[in-house]
Image (cartoon, rainbow, N blue to C red):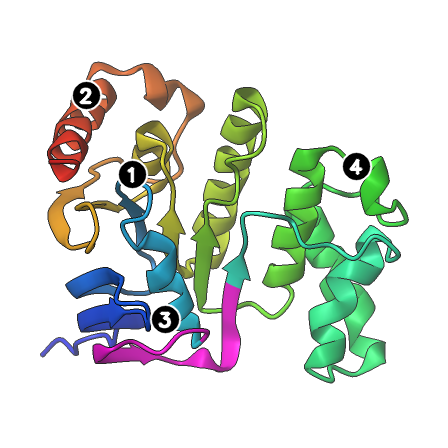
Amino acid sequence: MSLEVEPSLSFQNISMEFPDGTKAIADVSFDVSKGEFVTVVGPSGCGKSTLLRIASGLLEQTSGTVKVDRSNIGYVFQDATLFPWRTVRSNIELFLELHKIPKSDRAEIIQRSIDMVGLTGFEDYYPKALSGGMRMRASLARTLTLKPPLLMFDEPFGAVDEITREYLNEETLKLFSQEKFAGLFITHSISEAVFLSTRVLVMSARPGRVIASFDVPYAYPRDPSLRFEASFADLSGKINEALRSAHT
């Protein structure tokens, strides 16, 4: 007899109305389990980021139920949010300090995270000396120090150039393949969504509802050349069509 695996994150009929009367999301339900990478796309203002804030406890939904263990959630923001007076190593150490991890255990954890994101050799650099992509990798390394079972990404690569973005996508996939966390990713890029995900959800215009769901059939690890395959373009086209209908 097979046992059902409890989802790492479960949204059940979530709605959110702000005090000014703005209805951000309406009756949203979906789960994200360990080993799943779920990406949400939708028009600007449809409530994608609101879902992440509700999951993390930064917002409380108007109605519905969220099931999640908030004691160890990884959150990667749109901005790298590094302290300019701290080195890469010191920035990455921050979460370990806040969680009172013994200092004697930190060096190994920090170096592991640095190596995982490809910043070996840049441990003593300050954020101002790093490119945008490197700052984002440092932010990701900081999040990985606590090995969160659920990792949420709020359009983290939107501010970098296209080549850097593709590289960061590939690095994220390597991390996902290694760590097998549950991933919830927000983006405006259909190509990024398909390349990263096991499943892509499309949300409608405000109030945001899930109007389409697409399973992504490609096995991990994924080669960068996947982006140029006909089936990739076909699936991206179907998601684009659903996204266009989301604006109407």
- Which of pointers 4 and 1 lies earlier in the amino acid sequence? 4
Q: Which residue is mark 4?
A: 130
Disc nearest the viewer among 4 and 3: 3
**Residue type at mark 2?**
Ser
Disc nearest the viewer among 2 and 4: 4
> Residues in magenta?
58-74
- Which of pointers 3 and 2 lies earlier in the amino acid sequence? 3
| Closer-to-camera residue (185/5) | 185
Taking the magenta stretch, the answer to whether it contains residue 61 is yes
Mark 4 and mark 3: Cα distance apart in space? 32 Å
Counting from the top left corner in percent of width and height, residue 89 is at 82, 57
Q: Which residue is mark 3?
A: 54
Q: Helix or strand or loop: what does disc 4 sit on?
A: loop
Q: Which residue is mark 1?
A: 219
- Residue 231's label in the rendered image is 2
Mark 4 and mark 1: Cα distance apart in space? 33 Å
Counting from the top left corner in percent of width and height, residue 30 is at 19, 63
**Residue type at mark 4?**
Leu
Structural crowding at the residue carrying mark 1, measured as other residues with C-alpha within 10 Å and reported as few (<14), some (14–19) or many (≥20): few
- Image quadrant containing the N terminus: bottom left
